[in-house]
Image (tube, helix red, strand yellow):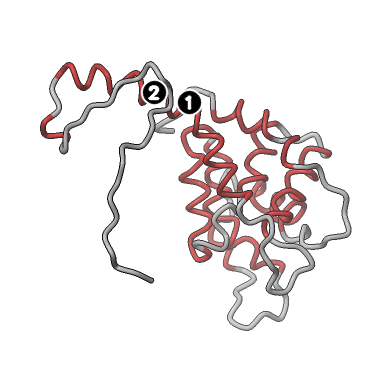
Amino acid sequence: MTDTPISLEPVPLAHDDWSYVKKRSMDDYEAADWAIWQPQRKVYFEENKVDHILRMLECQKDDPSFIYTTNNYYHCLQTATRMYRANCSEEDVVVGLLHDIGFVACNETHGEFAAALMRPFVSERNHWMLVHHAVFQQFHCHDLDGCDRHARDRWQGHPHFAWTAEFVEKYDQCTLSHDEEILPIAAFVPMVQRVFSKPPNLPY
């Protein structure tokens, strides 16, 4: 590792007809600058959001495993494939694809990570499921030291309890093996694009 400073050049703009605002602080932006910022920013997010999200998942494709015969990337594809073949809604399938997108980077809070990523574009039902699915998974961890199989019981009676339990049982805790035919990520890209192109749904 070197601490030698590097010199930066301007990063290319996403479109040839776009303009830079070459000011060092937003404190210095004026009305004319914001008039450039707003439309370019809107288009930039619309064009790049899904690519960024899928890259977060695809960068895990060649990861080794710590115990399972598949890794997190293929686990997510297996989950989404099962949900697609079970005729789940398109939103549910995309949620299944991305439910563990932060599993390695932020394991302790990966449910909240996925929930925050998807919150503006999914139902309250799926947001709640994403936040809580890791706790519900403990129900299936027989004989695991330190695991509270009944931790989920604190939410008995919640309107989204049944869906979260169903998701974990059918599509999460049992999608850990390599010997199951799955769809490639390309099959889900149009679904991801449609879900993330919906008008943001905040707050619930």
Out of 120 and 203, give the one closest to the viewer. Answer: 120
Mark 2: few/some/many CA within 10 Å (<14, 14-19, 20+):
few
The x, y position of residue 201, in whole percent, is 46, 28
Marks 1 and 2 in Cβ contact (< 8 Å): yes
Q: Nearer the viewer, residue 15 or 157?
A: 15
Residue shown at 67% from the left, 30% from the top: 191
Residue 27 is left or right of residue 113, and the answer is left
What residue would you read off at disc 2?
Answer: 42
Q: Is residue 187 above or below residue 97?
A: above
Q: Which residue is mark 1?
A: 46
Where is residue 32 shown, x and y percent of the image? 18, 16
Q: Position of residue 33 (x, y in %)?
A: 20, 21
Foreground: 193 or 35? 35
Q: Residue at x 15, y 27 (%)?
A: 29
Judge the density around disc 1: few (<14), some (14-19), many (≥20) Cα neighbours within 10 Å.
some
Element at badge 1? helix
Residues under labels 1 and 2: Cα distance? Answer: 6 Å
Amino acid type assigned to the residue bearing label 2 in the image: Lys
Secondary structure beneath label 2? helix
Give me the residue at 69% from left, 31% from top. 90
Q: How many marks?
A: 2
Q: Is residue 144 above or below residue 48?
A: below
